[in-house]
């Protein structure tokens, strides 16, 4: 057998061996050889939000760090104008899912602590929400005039009465307002709001989600849908606690679903107690998603007596 020449070994075989050794070295150390371009990191596209920095559109927003949504995002609302029936708006005072075609929020979520309650006077100046995406109809205060319905707050004015005044003013933005029958708004709903603040003044922190469902027609030439029901869920934390990891199966929960018919005489809020599961069935939402499944199940299926202390 004829052996390869010395020049063949130097010019052909040796470069192949060097390349093979280099490839083994780079691979063992997690590197990419220069001859193979590294692939760029893929990042989700972003869309500007109504009230803050851009948010990734690749997944539902979780509004990390916002105290008003610690129990979860019940409809997986997103900061995306392409989702006009479930558009997430985040503010320091509350977080909400807005429905452009209904002209109302689907739900509003907020926390109440003693530091939220003060002596700032009620603003009483309802305003269109200029933070809505371009081209969306901005509900006006006179859209409610002469309809028989109150401009009903979901996050109440009195829950944001601590300075600065902007806290109270934010509750009068019309994205936080629904057409509410007078008896519902001024009696049944208001009594439950007052109980909430009484519990807070006794040292409890509350997590609250309020919203609407059903259809009682429209006002403002069809621009605003009148809900058939208003509902509210209140989680009453142990005194001095705000950490949701302290929530147990025994944590008190108040849930109500109240008819919203004009001229209907209503009872006090306690007559409209339901389970959270009942509200889920009516809305299709999923509440308490930041809690463990067993605690979720316990809280959703019970009706507690109203806390008194």
Image: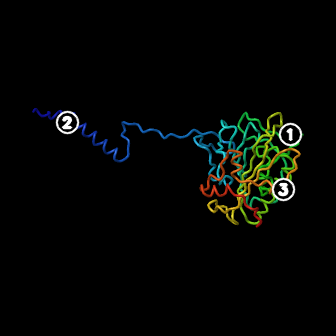
Q: In the rendered image, which quarter is residue 173 located in?
A: top right
Residue at which label 1 appears: 142
Which residue shows up at 36% across the image and 40% down it?
33
Q: Which of the marked residues, 1 or 2, is nearer the chain's N terminus? A: 2
Residue at which label 3 appears: 268
Q: Nearer the viewer, mark 1 or mark 3?
A: 3
Residue at which label 2 appears: 10
| SS for dot 2 | helix
Percent of width and height locating residue 90: 69, 47
Q: Quadrant of the C terminus?
A: bottom right
Between the residue at mark 1 and the residue at mark 3, the CA separation in whole angstroms equals 30 Å
Q: Residues within 10 Å of mark 3 (few under 14, many from 20)?
A: some
Q: Nearer the viewer, mark 1 or mark 2?
A: 1
Between the residue at mark 3 and the residue at mark 2, the CA separation in whole angstroms equals 97 Å
Front-most of residues 61 and 207: 207
Percent of width and height locating residue 3: 12, 34
């Amino acid at each position: 057998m004829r052996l390869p020449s010395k020049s063949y070994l130097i010019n052909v075989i040796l470069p192949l061996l060097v390349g093979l050794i280099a490839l083994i070295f780079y691979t063992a150390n997690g590197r990419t050889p220069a001859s193979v371009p590294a692939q760029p990191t893929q990042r989700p596209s972003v869309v500007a939000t109504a009230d803050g920095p851009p948010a990734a559109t690749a997944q539902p927003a979780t509004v990390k760090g916002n105290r008003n949504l610690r129990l979860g995002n019940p409809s997986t609302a997103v900061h995306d104008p392409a989702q006009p029936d479930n558009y997430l708006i985040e503010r320091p005072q509350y977080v909400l899912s807005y429905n452009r075609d209904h002209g109302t929020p689907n739900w509003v979520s907020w926390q109440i602590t003693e530091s939220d309650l003060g002596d700032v006077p009620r603003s009483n100046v309802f305003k269109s929400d200029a933070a809505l995406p371009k081209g969306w109809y901005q509900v006006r205060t006179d859209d409610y005039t002469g309809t028989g319905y109150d401009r009903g707050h979901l996050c109440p004015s009195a829950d944001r009465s601590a300075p600065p005044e902007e806290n109270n003013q934010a509750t009068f933005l019309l994205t936080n307002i629904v057409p509410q029958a007078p008896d519902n708004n001024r009696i049944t709903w208001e009594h439950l709001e007052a109980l909430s603040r009484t519990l807070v003044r006794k040292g409890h922190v509350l997590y609250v989600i309020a919203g609407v469902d059903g259809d009682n027609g429209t006002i403002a030439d069809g621009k605003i849908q009148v809900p058939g029901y208003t509902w509210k869920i209140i989680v009453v934390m142990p005194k001095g606690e705000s950490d949701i990891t302290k929530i147990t199966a025994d944590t008190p929960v108040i849930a109500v679903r109240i008819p919203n018919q004009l001229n209907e005489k209503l009872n006090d809020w306690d007559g409209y107690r339901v389970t959270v599961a009942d509200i889920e069935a009516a809305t299709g939402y999923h509440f308490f998603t930041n809690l463990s499944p067993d605690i979720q199940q316990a809280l959703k299926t019970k009706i507690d007596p109203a806390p008194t202390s």
